[in-house]
Image (cartoon, helix red, strand yellow):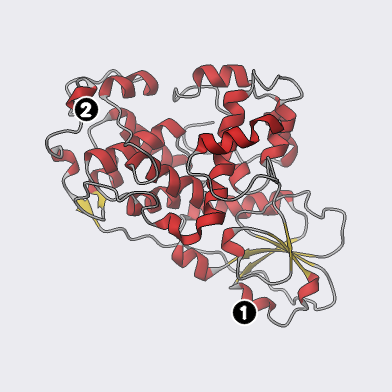
Amino acid sequence: MTKHSFPLLAYDDIIRSIENINPIQYAKSRNYITGAVSYLSPYIARGVISLPLVANIVLKKFTRFEAEKFLQELAWREYFQRVWQAKGDAIFSDLKHPQIPVKHTQIPTALIEANTGIEGIDTAIKHLYETGYMHNHARMYTAMLTCNIAHAHWLAPAQWMYYHLLDGDLASNMLSWQWVAGSFSSKKYVANQENINRYTNTNQTQTYLDGGYENFPLPQIPDPLNASSALSLHTLLPESDTLTIPTDQKIFIYNAYNLDPLWHKEEKGIRILLLEPTLYTRFPVSKKVIDFIVAIATNNIPNINIVVADFNDVFQHIPKNNIHYKEHPLNTHYTGIEESRDWLCASVSGYFPSFFNFWKKIQNKF
């Protein structure tokens, strides 16, 4: 990946990237900023490729034992989706425990400005702004600094990060922030300067994170993190294509979480990328994210039409048995023929209090 852009891949190139994954190298280096990660998360999050597709391709070359760490990362994404299915909008508030202590419900100004004083984190934030991508370990560091050092509540900063992420997934993002903050886990996640240096290839000393873990929690909020700002995020949506939607043909509804180019590929019908203003008012994303979503759709799904409108404003007079869409927690207001997403383990659903309870249920399914 270049410094200033994220690669926009055609479907065949995405498949080749999956085939090139080495889960052994991934397991050894995944926590390092320069580690052997796949950079496929935007395509997974946007539904271009499914979790079982990725797992099946990897397991053609590697044993389950060799691929276990990689498979667990796929399973974490599925786990978060299952929590969202079970808990609904509860994932947007403290799920298991109240986050404590909390000084404010805004976002540290230093976070927005990439000026926290911790080089590894500031560089990762700048990279996020430039590319729409942040390494998973850097996301943990950023959340840790925000929630457990600056004592900001996790929700606004999580919304800020989601806004910028090309692989923005509300379940993975919100629940990961809660896991770090201790509201969806048994303890808070903290990293010191030595840990950050090791995994971000920095060599910084004499920061407020220097010292052993016995020094945490810090006695006071460090000066660089004291100022906070209110969050103000807005989505700039494209113009709709000029389109008269027929009432006598199949209509396939795509959205930011279903951009699968193989979905009903051989069937005739009208294909629509639906971008709902109401949804993006509630969950804003950046122009970079919208442009990425539109580019994936138009580059990989022939003859797709872009419709910027809420579902009920467009499809209320269309026969419901002509409308096809994939299930998703953001689609509960859709009407028509709902189809299941592709799951790693479709037979295991519902709420599990921890990832490892979930993993025990599905690990033998591979």
Name above or below for residue 75 compared with residue 155: above
The residue pinned by badge 1 equals: 313
Residue 363 image point, x, y percent: 64, 31
Residue 105 image point, x, y percent: 26, 56
Q: The residue tagged with tag 2: helix, strand or loop? A: loop
Q: Quadrant of the C terminus?
A: top right
Say few, some or many: other residues with alpha carbon within 10 Å of mark 2 (under 14 / 14 to 19 / 20 or more). many
Q: Quadrant of the N terminus?
A: top right
Q: Amino acid at mark 2?
A: Leu
> Horizontal placement of 190 versus 34: left or right?
left
Q: Residue at x 54, y 49 (%)?
A: 351
303, 151: nearer the viewer: 151
Between the residue at mark 1 and the residue at mark 2, the CA separation in whole angstroms equals 52 Å
Between marks 1 and 2 in the image, the one whose residue lies nearer the viewer:
2
Residue 134, label in figure: none
Q: Is residue 39 visible?
A: no
253, 124: nearer the viewer: 253
Q: Is residue 307 visible?
A: yes
Q: The residue tagged with tag 1: helix, strand or loop? A: helix
> Horizontal placement of 335 versus 170: left or right?
right
Q: Residue at x 61, y 49 (%)?
A: 46
132, 162: nearer the viewer: 162
Q: Residue at x 27, y 25 (%)?
A: 192
Say few, some or many: other residues with alpha carbon within 10 Å of mark 1 (under 14 / 14 to 19 / 20 or more). few
Residue 209, label in figure: 2
